[in-house]
Amino acid sequence: MRLSDFLRDHGQLLSHWGLFSMGSLDFPFEQTGDDYLKSAERDLQHEDNSGNINALTNAKRAIDCQLEALIAKFGLSKKKAFPERTSQLQRIGLVAPRILQKVNKTRNFLEHEFKVPEREAAEDAVDIATLFVKVTNSIFYDFYGQAEFHEPNIYDKPPTGLLLRLDWKEELSGFQAYFGNTTGHLHSEVVAPSSDLHVDFIHLFVALRTTQDDPTELFRAIVLKQAA
């Protein structure tokens, strides 16, 4: 049995869920968003054009670093343009891209029109970058490694009922899924970046660490998509 078929036929019965194995993801780069934020805060201490320019530049670097790290870690398609990269994160339920675009637009004025940012614009950029880094850090440093969706009686003795368990596999940038009836043999399937379910499950796990989406509603949406 394929996982998509299991979700289509039985997903609506998996009304209970649990989370396990919280831990940290390996950050893929030597520099982190926090490193660039520290530089940006030091830049703001210089209340002149140079300080404003450097603060804005490091704020943009902090955002770019976190963007690229998430894209790499979750096996998302790499994009060159900034709007396309923020759209990749929007697919997994992260950030408010319009806010990040504000920083990018200000940075573009600096790079292409050589317009020095005002002090307020530099401070706004650092504040926006700080919020973004803190939200994404909650994923990198407090990530659930396993989630289960199951029928209410799954923990009876002996256990009975249907189960879906998703184990995060960092080396796959995806999941190992186990599913079926606990009274028999559980099926297994890899949910890698090439899988149609990959982005939906990444979105689900991201929602477990943020407040932007309801994980229960996301799981129901995944089930309904398979039934369509």
Image (cartoon, rainbow, N blue to C red):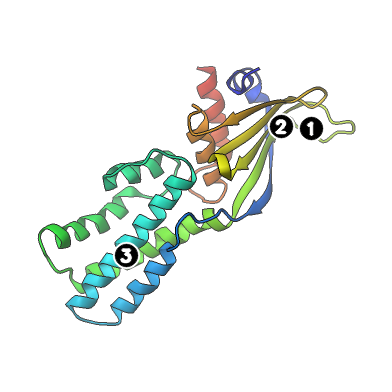
Foreground mark, 1 or 3?
3
Q: Are marks 1 and 2 in contact (CB under 8 Å)?
A: yes
Tag 1 secondary structure: loop
Q: Quadrant of residue 107?
A: bottom left
Residue 150, label in figure = 2
Residue 214 place in picture, x, y as percent = 54, 42
Q: CA distance from mark 1 to mark 3?
A: 48 Å
Mark 1 vs mark 2, CA separation in Å: 6 Å
Between discs 2 and 3, the one toward the N terminus: 3
Q: Height in image: 87 above or below 224?
A: below
State the SS at label 3: helix
In the foreground, 37 or 156:
37
> Which corner quadrant of the image does residue 104 belong to?
bottom left
Amino acid identity at mark 3:
Ala
* Residue labelled with disc 1: 154
Q: Closer to the camera, 96 or 174?
A: 174
| Residue 38 position (above or below residue 226) | below
**Residue type at numbered disc 2:** His
Q: Kindly identify the amino acid type of the residue bearing the numbered disc 1.
A: Ile
Q: Earlier in the sequence, mark 1 or mark 3?
A: 3
Q: Residue 59: which numbered mark, if any?
A: 3
Q: Nearer the viewer, mark 2 or mark 3?
A: 3
Q: Residue 77: image x %, image y %?
A: 39, 38
Figure quadrant of the N terminus: top right
Q: Are marks 2 and 3 in contact (CB under 8 Å)?
A: no
| Rendered residue at 71%/32% (across/down) | 150
Q: Point out residue 48 in the picture as x, y percentages from the top left corner.
A: 19, 80
> Quick check: 47 left or right of 74?
left
Provide residue 33's location: percent of width, then percent of height: 41, 62
Left or right: residue 88 compared with residue 135: left
